[in-house]
Amino acid sequence: MPLRGDRLRQLRLSRGFTQEALAEKLSLGIRQIHRYERGLSDPSGNIVAKIAKELDVTTDYLLGLSDLPNNNQPSEQALTAQEQLLLTAYRRKEVALLVQIINAALDQAPDGLPGAKGDGPSTSRRRRRRSQSDPPQPQR
């Protein structure tokens, strides 16, 4: 299966590499990247794997087997600090921390979302109010 030279070129440029710099990083001859991009030469599987790792994409993407550069999985560097904390808590099965993070996010949610500020009192406040305002129930 031939390497998609157009994808290699686009990725190389988006990562700020010259052909020579990428070739050096991969321990290849100085003109080899040019040959791959132009379809004049096909890299071995080992080289495709090295290119994919260096450019942070899948080999399937480089070979045209997938249109998703990273299998549609965001890298953890792309996550916000809150998202990373949530993911870490989930992986560690720290339920109390998960609830705390979600409640904090709901407190900051825009109006109109369930549990958002301005969407009425929270469930716990509603329960408290109901229990304070309801007449005492007769005992049997």
Image (cartoon, rainbow, N blue to C red):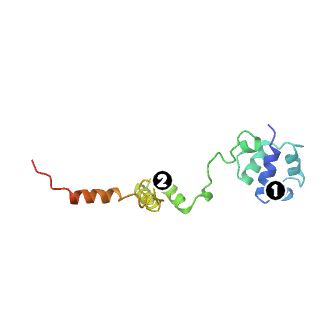
Return the residue nearer the eye: 89 or 112: 112
Q: Helix, strand or loop at disc 2?
A: helix
The amino acid sitting under disc 2 is Tyr
Q: Residue at x 86, y 58 (%)?
A: 20
Residue 101 percent coordinates (x, y): 45, 59
> Tag on residue 22?
1
The amino acid sitting under disc 1 is Leu
Q: Which residue is mark 2?
A: 90
Q: Is residue 135 left or right of residue 130?
A: left
Residue 136 percent coordinates (x, y): 15, 55
Q: Is residue 120 left or right of residue 35?
A: left
Q: Residue at x 70, y 47 (%)?
A: 69
> Tag on residue 13?
none
Q: CA distance from mark 1 to mark 2?
A: 37 Å
Looking at the picture, does residue 134 appear above or below residue 49?
below
Residue extending furthest top?
A: 1
Q: Are marks 1 and 2 in contact (CB under 8 Å)?
A: no
Q: Residue at x 30, y 57 (%)?
A: 126
Q: Helix, strand or loop at disc 1?
A: helix
Residue 76 percent coordinates (x, y): 60, 56
Q: Earlier in the sequence, mark 1 or mark 2?
A: 1
Residue extending furthest left?
A: 140
Q: Is residue 80 left or right of residue 92?
A: right
Q: Residue at x 62, y 58 (%)?
A: 78
Q: Give the quadrant of residue 42.
A: top right
Q: Residues within 10 Å of mark 1 (few under 14, many from 20)?
A: many
Residue 121 percent coordinates (x, y): 35, 59
